[in-house]
Image (tube, coloured by chain):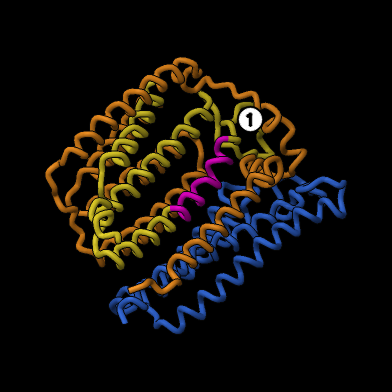
């Protein structure tokens, strides 16, 4: 159970950062921390005691494997996470070139 | 973008080819060992990014490279879609049907269509990440001028 | 096993807290790398080598992109005294975290013990999967055969994200 708890606390830390920080880079970092905790949770619920990695050896088939479905879902999600983080970074770099700051309060004041 | 020192350049020359070969190995053996299209594609993109960071490149060359990688990306995703459609047209009328002969378990050429999907998804992922990286580098270069 | 994962996750939490509170943005980005590489070790302990290979390369490329963005800026998060709006948002965030914690307590009590989980989908995907797909790597079998629609969708999202990046970075901004 303690592994689940730590995973949830990691998610809450990311959420706290996303709500309270005013810096765009910090918000992007917080979002990716939340993403990581979700991946970790998927891998945790797929784990089975005494299981081996889900690769079949034809000469020596084993009975217990770790659940491959959460791993397959996370596998694609990690690459998508990279693409979305890069897109966030593209938005941030454009905002910095236009306004010269990462602070979202100043950006709000400069609008007009 | 300026390149780095001679030591970095020489080391990169030695390493980048091996990284590229490792990416291709991971893609081709995706149905036998850990890895597959997504992992291998990211490694392939990593080898290109290593080369660009170490050697640097001028703006015009990067634009040309970006046009090529965008083309490869679109062709690869189109091929994946066509392979999935081929199950609908040729096989047993099921989208994403694995209609090719399976072969024996554990051989390099086995598992029907899975190696083909692996290869094209690998190309797509590699081209996508390379395109993102090139777009960011070109943007920074343009702003500097 | 569970204790080891809990310890590594604890280190990840410390790295995350430092990343959120660091003054220098470059050290914040690098502290974010602690979380990513800790995740790689967790994946290896949880018997997921596929995920470990992907995550270690993706984390490296993410760090390169983030450092490239941070390096040509002023790099400092300016300290500012919390205004009334800041206090409101602090209170709100405490409230939201409390509500989330409550729901997590409910959901954890409904989960199986760690290591004893029995997902009903796991059975059909493992038994007879090698005959159906011919693939020795069960994860590849699930990704490209049983759940091909998902993979096609994710590949489309990837293409869309690339198009978004190209669109955002190509237009000339109004001066």
The magenta stretch is A70-84
Chain B: colour as depicted:
blue
Judge whether C27 appears above or below B13 on screen.
above
Chain C image colour: orange
Nearest to the observer: residue C33 or residue C136: C33
How many dots with numbers? 1
Establish if A25 lies above or below A58.
below
Q: Residue B60, image x and y in percent?
A: 45, 84
Which quadrant does the C terminus of chain A fall into? bottom left
Q: Is residue B108 visible?
A: yes
C41 lies left or right of A109: right
Image point (37%, 44%), residue name = A31
Q: Indicate the colour of chain A.
A: yellow
Q: Residue at x 69, y 39 (%)?
A: A58
Residue nearest the viewer, comparing C151 with C83: C83
Q: In the displayed structure, does residue C124 sit left or right of residue A14?
A: right
């Amino acid at each position: 159970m303690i592994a689940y708890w730590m995973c949830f606390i990691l998610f809450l830390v990311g959420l706290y950062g996303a709500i309270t920080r005013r810096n765009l880079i910090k918000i992007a970092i917080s979002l990716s921390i939340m993403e990581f905790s979700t991946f970790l949770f998927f891998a945790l619920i797929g784990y089975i005691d005494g299981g081996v990695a889900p690769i079949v050896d034809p000469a020596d088939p084993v009975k217990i494997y770790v659940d491959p479905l959460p791993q397959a879902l996370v596998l694609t999600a990690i690459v998508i996470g990279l693409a979305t983080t890069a897109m966030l970074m593209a938005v941030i770099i454009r905002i910095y070139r236009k306004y010269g700051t990462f602070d979202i309060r100043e950006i709000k004041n400069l609008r007009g | 973008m300026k390149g780095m020192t001679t030591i970095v350049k020489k080391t990169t020359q030695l390493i980048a080819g091996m990284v590229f070969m490792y990416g291709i190995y991971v893609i081709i053996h995706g149905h036998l060992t850990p890895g597959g299209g997504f992992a291998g594609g990211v490694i392939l993109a990593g080898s290109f990014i290593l080369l660009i960071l170490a050697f640097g490149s001028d703006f015009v060359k990067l634009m040309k490279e970006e046009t090529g990688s965008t083309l490869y990306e679109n062709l690869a995703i189109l091929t994946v879609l066509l392979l999935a459609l081929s199950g609908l047209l040729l096989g047993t009328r099921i989208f994403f049907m694995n209609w090719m002969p399976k072969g024996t378990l554990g051989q390099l050429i086995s598992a029907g269509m899975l190696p083909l999907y692996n290869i094209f998804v690998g190309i797509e992922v590699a081209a996508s990440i390379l395109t993102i990286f090139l777009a960011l580098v070109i943007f920074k270069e343009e702003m500097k001028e | 096993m569970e204790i080891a994962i809990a310890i590594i996750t604890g280190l990840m939490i410390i790295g995350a807290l430092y990343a959120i509170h660091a003054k220098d943005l470059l050290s914040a980005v690098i502290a974010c790398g602690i979380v990513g590489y800790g995740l790689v070790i967790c994946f290896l302990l949880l018997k997921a080598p596929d995920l470990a290979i992907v995550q270690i390369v993706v984390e490296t490329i993410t760090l390169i992109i983030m450092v490239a963005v941070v390096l040509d800026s002023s790099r400092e998060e300016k300290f500012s005294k919390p205004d009334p709006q800041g206090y409101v948002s602090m209170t709100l965030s405490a409230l939201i975290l409390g509500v989330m914690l409550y729901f997590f307590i409910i959901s954890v009590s409904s989960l199986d013990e760690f290591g004893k989980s029995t997902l009903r989908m796991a059975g059909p995907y493992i038994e007879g999967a090698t005959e159906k797909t011919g693939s020795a790597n069960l994860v590849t079998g699930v990704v490209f055969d049983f759940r091909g629609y998902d993979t096609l969708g994710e590949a489309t999202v990837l293409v869309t994200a690339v198009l978004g990046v190209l669109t955002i970075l190509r237009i000339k901004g109004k001066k």
